[in-house]
Image: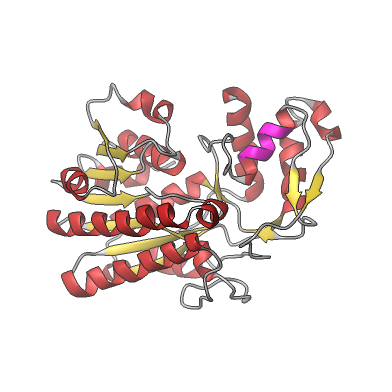
Amino acid sequence: MFEQFKTQLENKKVLVTGGAGFIGSNLCEVLLGLGAYVTCLDNFATGHKHNIEPFLENANFTLIEGDIRDLSTCHAACKNQDFVLHQAALGSVPRSINDPITTNDVNVGGFLNMLVAARDAEVMRFVYAASSSTYGDSEALPKVEDVIGKPLSPYAITKYVNELYAENFFRTYGLNTIGLRYFNVFGRRQDPNGAYAAVIPLFVKKFMNHESPVINGDGTFSRDFTYIDNVVQMNLLCITTENETALNQIYNTAVGDRTTLVQLTELIKKHLAVYDPSISDVDIVHGANRKGDIPHSLASVAKANKMLGYKATHSIDAGIEEAVGWYWESL
C-alpha cells in the first residue's frame, strides 16, 4: 500500500517516539518495510513490548528504552536522524482531568525536550501528533485548521501548546515542523485494556465477550473515526513531500466523515457477527455523558488534499472490517 514512498525513504534514518504504542508501532512496521533505519524511543508507560517484538531481530531497527522527560535521552535518540515522527504522549481526556500534572509534564515538557534535541541534531523535519481536541468548544463543522475554540480539558491544552511551540521553533530556529491533528484513530494494535481504552477496541472486546458496552449519553455524539492506515499515509507524506509550502503547517488527519456512537456500535456488531452471529443479539447500555467531551467532530481534509496530496484509503466501514478481523485473531 505504501510502496510509492520506498525510493524516498529507503536508507533514511527515522526516529519514532512512542514507537511501541498503537500508532508508533504501525509507523515502525511500515518504515522498516520501506527500507528505512528506524529508531524507537519508548518508556513503555502506555506502549507494549509485544508491539515491537517482531522488529527486534531486524538489523535496521534500534530500540531506546527511555523517557522524553529526560533531555539527554532525547538528544541521544535524535542524533544522526533525518526525520522525527513524535508520537509519544499521554493521551486521554479523562486521564488528563484525573492527573493534569503528569499529562503536562509528558505532553509539554517532554515535547519541548524533543524539539530542543531535534533542533540540536539538525533533523530535516519534525512531524508530531497533534489532536482534534484542540478545536475545543468551537461548534463549527467541519473543523478547519485555522478556526479553533477554547480547549475543554488539560489534555487539549497540552496539545495546543505543542502547536505553539512547534511554530515558535520554526520561526526562531528554523526547525521544520508539521502537526497532524489526529481524529479518533483506530485499528490494529490499539489496546482494548486499561482504564483509558479507546472506544472501538473496548467495544470490540466487550462484544467478543458477549458483554454490553456502555455508550456515554444517548449515542448521538459523532466522531470522524480514522483508520490507522490513513494516519500512516499522512506521516509518510509529511516526511517525503517536496512542496516547501506544505512544511510548518497543521493538518487535520481524518476521513472527512462522521459517525455517531450508535452507528459505530452497529458497524462493529455487523463485522463481528461474521465470526460469531450471536454477537448481533448483544444489547447496548447507555450511561452519563463524559466530562470534557465535545458533541460532534468532523474534519475538513481539504488542506491535506491540496498541500500533501492526501486521500483517505479507508472509510469507517472498511477500517472497522479490517480492525475487527485483527482483534478476532489477536484477542
Q: Is residue 130 above or below residue 25?
A: below
Tell me: 16 left or right of 231.
left
List x then y, in percent, for residue 269: 76, 37
List x then y, in percent, for residue 262: 77, 51
List x then y, in percent, for residue 190: 53, 38
**Identity of the residue drawn at 57% across and 48% down:** 314
In terms of image quadrants, where is residue 224?
A: bottom right
Magenta-drawn stretch contains 122: no
Q: Which residues are magenta?
A: 201-206
**Which of 249/10 is in front?**
249
**Which of 37/107 is in front?**
107
In terms of image quadrants, where is residue 197?
A: top right
Magenta-drawn stretch contains 205: yes
Tell me: 203 left or right of 319.
right
Query: Colour scheme in the image?
Result: secondary structure
**Which of 191/189 is in front?**
191
Quadrant of the image containing the C terminus: top right
Q: Is residue 88 above or below residue 56?
A: below
**Identity of the residue drawn at 50% across and 45% down:** 228
Q: Is the stretch drawn in magenta largely helix, strand or loop?
A: helix
List x then y, in percent, for residue 49: 39, 28
Q: Is residue 57 visible?
A: yes
Q: Is residue 65 above or below residue 229?
A: above
Tell me: 161 left or right of 260.
left
**Identity of the residue drawn at 64% across and 60% down:** 291
**Identity of the residue drawn at 24% across and 59% down:** 115
In terms of image quadrants, where is residue 172?
A: bottom left
**Which of 129/193 is in front?**
193
